[in-house]
Amino acid sequence: MKKSFASLTAPVYAAVIREKTPTNAICAIKNAEINGATAFDLHLSCLEQEYRTVDNIRNIVECTSKPMLGLNYNITVDKGGYACSEEDRIALLLMAVDAGISAVDFQGYTYDLLSKDNFVGEDIYSFTKNNPKEIVTDEKIIKKQKALIDKVHKKGAEVLLSCHPNIFLNKTQVVDLAKFMEERNPDIIKIITVCNTEEEMVQAFETMVALKNEIKSAKIHFHCTGKTGKLTRIVNPLLGAYMTFCVDRYAEGHTVEQLHLKTFVDVMDGIKKLL
């Protein structure tokens, strides 16, 4: 039976694994376990092509008793992003499901590459203003996404449905978007927006509280990038965000804005003693 990624005690300390080989990935996982990781965030596309097989992914998954989320964001460790068909991108995620991974991340633009970088639908929702990325409103595409989520569920794995609009969205817009995504029946919803001012940051905190109260059928994660976004990575888990994405050891290919694993675990442990 697959380990559940969606039923952990929040906040989940998900260590981001971006490695070229299974051996390096396993070593990174073992080091992160020592430093407090409670789950793992495996970037499948960072594995070199020769290692993208069921057996290799299974070896990575089975090296730990903790659940693992598989991602395919079309990135490599040292070459950045690359073009990839939706069929190939999804096939790698389904391969990870067959290898025993607990959950996979389906991005909001799944089956609609045009919406990866621009909004291409009809502007009839609060969250479709100002050209957000990764938002699909085409019912035909949404139907395909629902079928894909159902397929993963039938295989015994879970689904995180993610959206990175790459703009600021206010509280109403984010809650409306989360409810819109919730209709596709994911196990976890992840929304990442942008905040560049203190006022936007404060609203992001209010948004997280609203999401916790409004979203009932899925776990919810929300934080921001941008000039004032980093504090939302720290505070939002205290307000109800399901997880935080951490790095055990910063190296080439990692996102340096993500929190340092052991430091964040220690901070959270200290806060728990004060509450």
Image (cartoon, rainbow, N blue to C red):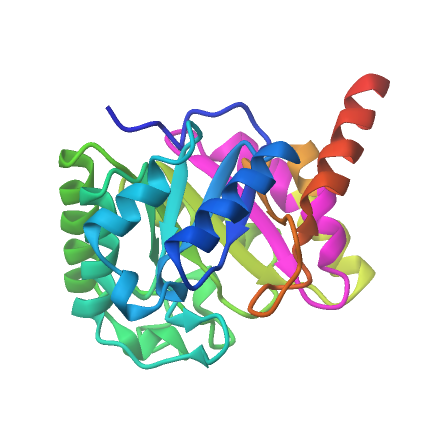
How many numbered tags mark residues here?
0
Relative to 40, is 255 above or below? below
- Is residue 183 visible from the viewing direction of this image? no
Q: Residue at x 23, y 59 (%)?
A: 92
Residue 190 is inside the magenta segment: no
- 63 left or right of 8 in image: left
Rendering quarter of residue 226: bottom right
Q: Quadrant of residue 32?
A: top right
Quadrant of the image containing the N terminus: top left
Does residue 23 appear left or right of residue 100 in this picture?
A: right
Where residue 228 appears, as percent x and y from the top left, is: 77, 62
Range of residues picked out in magenta: 207-235
Quadrant in the picture for the C terminus:
top right
Q: Is residue 226 magenta?
A: yes
Nearest the eye: 121 or 95: 95
Residue 39 lies, with reference to residue 10, above or below; the image says: below
* Occupied quadrant, residue 88: bottom left
